[in-house]
Image: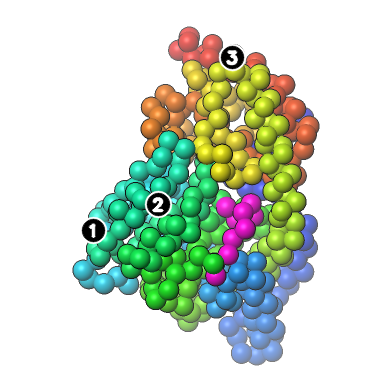
């Protein structure tokens, strides 16, 4: 038995993306070259950019291809810092953000002198618009926020966050990596004006069935960003280097296939999630579902009181079931979930959670396998905890 319920980490590549990559990988010319082969590669690349832009409801010139969500987030935040006005030195960072965001901001604090203004989460893991607006002001370089929390699945009120940033004259970056493929995303709808409000949005291909190490930062024309590295004038001078034609083409194919089936896939994931939720709560009455009811369709984040999430993960893995603790892992040492802590829970609770994330390939049999094994895994994990 092999059950994969960690689609939030990476989901299997779509056949459309795989086939597109294989077909395009033979495009060996550099798309910046001016000879015929190079210009053919450029046309293929720009067709892919237009396809991704259509899916994200953005202008093609706004799509900057990157190596994935982490680079996109780094470009948005460090690029905003390096192009800032000198009287601004604060970054607004809500609690519970992805580590790519947290670590980028921490580097800017430690190495560049940025001041950081946090925004507390609600008990459901939500960024409240009033608290977010209260953190904004004339000293802000950039604010950032998750469209949907990658651990607990809570969907944030991004239209209200964007409106608050627009009113305050603050540029806002949205991390949409977890939301992409599961929620309708429209950059045109959330985009701010005159360099304030939503000016950038990060996405990653491997979350929607595209290739790993491929992503994009959608950057409005009015955004002020500096490049992370230099060596050419590609992509609005925001990302130097030879562009990955095959990766972009595969990303575009995955995005188009996802867009065509997103509503069907989201309904499928939500139905399985609800079955899984009912089954787990029946098998383990002590379990608690964390996060908001306004959550990603394939996300189920569960607290198992008195049990180590790491132990549960290993016990389920031995049964052929792959899930996640939803916590960071540094040098092989599991850490308590910073998101759960930000929701007001203690460290013990933050070490007792599992994230089940379903995808388009998930099945009823996957759900049944978890339900059949979760009670015995919980009993073993709580027994181990009592003995330790």
Q: Is residue 150 left or right of residue 244?
A: left
Main SS, magenta region, reads loop
Position of residue 148 measured from the top left corner of the image (x, y, whole percent): 52, 49
Sequence order check, earlier mark of 3 and 2: 2
Q: Nearer the viewer, residue 114 or 195?
A: 195
Which residue is the extreme one toward the left? 87
User: Which residue matches tag 1?
Assistant: 113
- Residue 248 visible, this orientation: no
Q: Secondary structure at mark 3?
A: helix
Q: Is residue 180 magenta?
A: yes
User: Which residue matches tag 3?
Assistant: 380
Q: Secondary structure at mark 1?
A: loop
The answer for how far apart the CA atoms under marks 1 and 3 are is: 48 Å
Sequence order check, earlier mark of 1 and 2: 1
Q: Is residue 192 above or below residue 286?
A: below
Position of residue 374 measured from the top left corner of the image (x, y, whole percent): 65, 22
User: Which residue matches tag 2?
Assistant: 129
At a point 56% along the width and 43% down the height, the residue shown is 294
Sequence order check, earlier mark of 1 and 3: 1
Q: Is residue 55 magenta?
A: no
Q: Nearer the viewer, residue 181 or 376?
A: 181
Q: Which residues are magenta?
A: 179-188
The answer for how far apart the CA atoms under marks 1 and 2 are is: 27 Å
Which residue is the extreme one toward the top? 387
- Report crowding for label 1: few under 14, some 14 to 19, many 20 or more residues within 10 A (C-alpha): few
Position of residue 323 measured from the top left corner of the image (x, y, whole percent): 62, 34
Q: Is residue 109 left or right of residue 312?
A: left
């Amino acid at each position: 038995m092999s059950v994969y319920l960690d689609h939030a980490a990476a989901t299997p590549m779509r056949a459309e993306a795989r086939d597109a990559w294989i077909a395009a990988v033979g495009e060996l010319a550099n798309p910046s070259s001016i000879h015929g082969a190079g210009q053919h590669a450029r046309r293929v690349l720009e067709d892919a950019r237009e396809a991704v832009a259509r899916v994200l409801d953005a202008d093609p010139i706004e799509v900057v291809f990157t190596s994935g969500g982490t680079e996109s987030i780094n470009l948005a935040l460090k690029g905003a810092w390096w192009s800032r006005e000198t009287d601004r030195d604060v970054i607004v960072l809500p609690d519970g953000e992805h580590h790519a965001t947290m670590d980028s901001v921490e580097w800017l604090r430690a190495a560049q002198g940025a001041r950081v203004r946090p925004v507390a989460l609600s008990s459901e893991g939500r960024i409240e618009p009033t608290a977010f607006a209260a953190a904004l002001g004339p000293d802000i370089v950039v604010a950032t926020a998750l469209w949907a929390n990658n651990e607990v699945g809570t969907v944030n009120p991004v239209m209200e966050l964007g409106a608050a940033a627009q009113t305050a004259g603050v540029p806002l970056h949205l991390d949409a990596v977890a939301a992409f493929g599961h929620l309708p995303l429209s950059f045109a709808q959330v985009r701010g004006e005159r360099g304030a409000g939503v000016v950038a949005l990060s996405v990653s291909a491997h979350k929607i069935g595209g290739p790993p190490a491929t992503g994009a930062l959608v950057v409005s024309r009015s955004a002020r960003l500096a490049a992370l590295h230099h060596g050419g004038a590609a992509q609005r001078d925001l990302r130097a280097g030879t562009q990955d034609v095959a990766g972009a083409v595969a990303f575009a194919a995955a995005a188009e296939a996802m867009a065509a089936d997103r509503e069907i896939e989201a309904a499928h994931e939500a139905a399985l999630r609800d079955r899984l939720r009912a089954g787990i709560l029946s098998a383990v009455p002590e379990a608690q579902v964390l996060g908001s009811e306004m959550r990603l369709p394939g996300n189920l984040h569960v607290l198992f009181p008195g049990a180590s999430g790491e132990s549960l993960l290993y016990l389920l893995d031995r049964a052929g079931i792959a899930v996640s603790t939803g916590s960071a892992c540094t040098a092989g040492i599991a850490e308590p979930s910073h998101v759960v802590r930000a929701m007001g829970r203690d460290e013990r609770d933050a070490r007792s959670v599992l994230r089940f994330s379903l995808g388009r390939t998930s099945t009823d049999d996957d759900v049944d396998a978890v339900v059949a094994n979760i009670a015995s895994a919980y009993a073993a994990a709580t027994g181990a905890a009592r003995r330790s």
